[in-house]
Image (cartoon, rainbow, N blue to C red):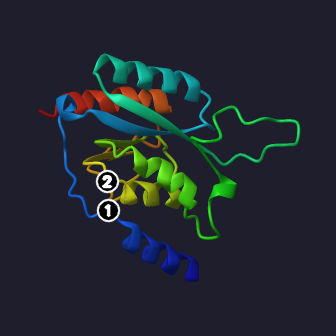
Amino acid sequence: MLKEYCQRQALKKGASPEPTGLLPLKRVRSAVVFIDVEDTSFNECKNEVLAFFRSHGIKGEVFFFDFRKLSKDERLITSITTTVLRKDLNWFGKPSKEKMQLLLQGEPDMFLSLVSAESYALEFMASCSRARFKVGRQDSKVYDLVFCDTPEKPLSQKEAFREIVKLMEKIS
């Protein structure tokens, strides 16, 4: 109960006042994307996202969520700067100031989450982002466009990205 109260208060305090809404792809100049490293196709997904951005003239930055417990022998497979780790979260799931500053400094036009699992940290980052168009896979009032796959056929992040692109291309 205390945890949920702190989460709600942090969301209220940190939420961006910028109005958001659907934005045609031709008006998106910069974007930030969140990918979950636990999805086995995360690297292919990252490459596809970056190729898409290049082909549309969008300056894109990719952030990763990696909440796995690594053994002493294992190494992080993504850049420490752009990866949100479990240790980057406080006791109720709020990301550190350093990670938030990295996210907010670019002031992207679009915030895109390909992470399918619910995550307070991701909801907080989306809420605080000053992006004018927010797309996600979690059913949350933070996002302007939500893509939900069915429980019978869950999609990988790469497949979800392709479906989201189809939807975004219909926005004019």
| 115 on left or right of 25 | right
- In this rendering, is residue 32 above or below 7? above
Task: Estimate how packed mark 1 is, as few (under 14), some (14 to 19) or many (20 or more) residues with alpha carbons within 10 Å.
Answer: some
Q: Where is residue 90 in the image (x, y as percent from the top left)?
A: 63, 66
- Residue found at x 78% / y 35%: 75
- In this rendering, is residue 171 above or below 15? above
Q: In which quarter of the image is residue 42?
A: top right
- In this rendering, is residue 51 above or below 134? above
Q: Where is mark 1, residue-wise?
A: 16
The answer, for residue 154, to whether it is visible in the render is no
Marks 1 and 2, Cα distance to the nearest angstrom? 6 Å
Task: Estimate how packed mark 2 is, as few (under 14), some (14 to 19) or many (20 or more) residues with alpha carbons within 10 Å.
Answer: many
Say what amino acid the circle numbered 2 marks: Arg
Image quarter in which the C terminus is found: top left
Task: Identify the element where label 1 is drawn.
Answer: loop
| 85 on left or right of 82 | right
Task: Identify the element where label 2 is drawn.
Answer: loop
Q: Which of marks 1 and 2 is nearer the N terminus?
A: 1
Q: Where is mark 2, residue-wise?
A: 130
Q: Position of residue 20 (x, y in %)?
A: 22, 53
Say what amino acid the circle numbered 1 marks: Ser
